[in-house]
Amino acid sequence: MTGPMIHRYAFPIALGALLALGGLILLLVLRPGLAPSRAEVAHQIAADLRCPDCQGLSVADSSSASATEIRRQIDAQLSSGRSPDQVKKSFVDRYGEWILLSPSAPIAWLLPVGVLLAAIGMLAVWIVRSRRPEAPAATSAVSDMDRARAREEAEALDA
Amino acid sequence: MRALRWLLVPIVVVPVTLLLLHGFSRDPAAIPSALIGKPMPAFSLVTLEGRTVTASQLRGKPVVLNFWASWCPSCVDEHAVLLDAAQRYGNSVQIVGVLYQDSPDGARGFEARYGQPNWPTLLDPNGSLAIDFGVSGPPESYVIDANGIVRYKQFGPLTPQVIADQVGRLLGTAGAGGG
């Protein structure tokens, strides 16, 4: 393919690729997935809850007595028709937000990310500025005319 | 402008230092209770002696609800503090033990060794009451007022001072009798 041909087809190809990518993302987001079973929902809730008497484990991953009882209560609450959010809230009401492995308030996620982005931005600005070439030195205060005159005077003295 | 740039240092350093100081000065295992100011969860449990106790029966006087276990080392010292408190406050305060992930035999052996309490110990075989109170491990205690409202959570063993402060506050004798 010659250069002009590439130029001619580049835009349609790029547009097509972009449209295909957009379509794929839409399909992934909007596709009607199979409804999860109650056991899957229960497992997901348990995975989101912190095991109260373990170190850094979720209720789903722990075999402690508390985790076992919490899993039983999750199942019982789902069986009685409560929604996953209501089930989670019932544990937050007792343990506080601590019981959630991921904080529910977006600020808790956004704040550290914001600070990190700001720090990276400031670092980038600092690096760019420190790499910028020095401004050209100011033009000499001695003009070419002065130089020529000085040279003439020196020659006159030598003669 | 150049001098202003140096202002960034305290702007960044001071909050980060305060945050770290706050983080390191607290017990990471201590969980603030979500129940403070709320009614205690309803329950109906059986004591070591086979008697049924319900939450509503505990109304009328301040309650110290103590989650403990015979395998918990700091529960030994705390038991002595509770025995002393039971003697000090008599009938004006109700102490109630709740066995946490332990067997009745383990509890009886503990009581025989470290002193027979005059308060009931509730059996919580599947730990549902501990979960209702948001307990993460023994010893953990809750001070509940005469109306059944949870007023205080003690993470770790109770001390004479904590009992004097928290129970005394409910009895109107805060600070007296501690030490």
Image (tube, helix red, strand yellow):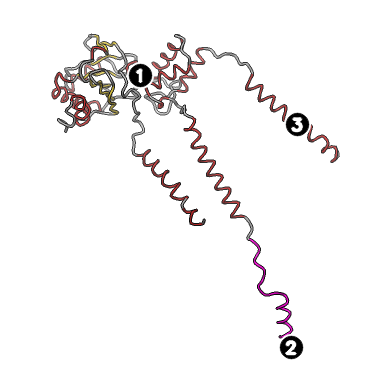
Q: CA distance from mark 2 to mark 3?
A: 76 Å
Question: In the shown orientation, is residue B94 left or right of residue A155?
Answer: left
Numbered range of the magenta stretch: A135-158
Q: CA distance from mark 1 to mark 3?
A: 57 Å
Residue B63 quadrant: top left
Task: Return the chain for callout 2.
Answer: A
Q: CA distance from mark 1 to mark 2?
A: 107 Å
* Disc 1 residue type (three-letter): Ile
Residue A8 quadrant: top right
* Disc 2 residue type (three-letter): Ala
Q: Nearer the viewer, residue B101 or A98?
A: A98
The quarter in which the N terminus of chain A is drawn is: top right
Query: What residue does disc 1 label?
Result: B131
Other residues around mark 3 within 10 Å, as few (<14) / some (14–19) / many (≥20): few
Q: Main secondary structure of the magenta part?
A: helix
For label 3, the SS is helix
For label 1, the SS is helix
Which residue is pictured at 74% across the width and 84% down the height? A152
Labels 1 and 3 positioned on one and the same chain: no
Q: Is residue A5 above or below residue A35?
A: below
Query: What residue does disc 2 label?
Result: A156
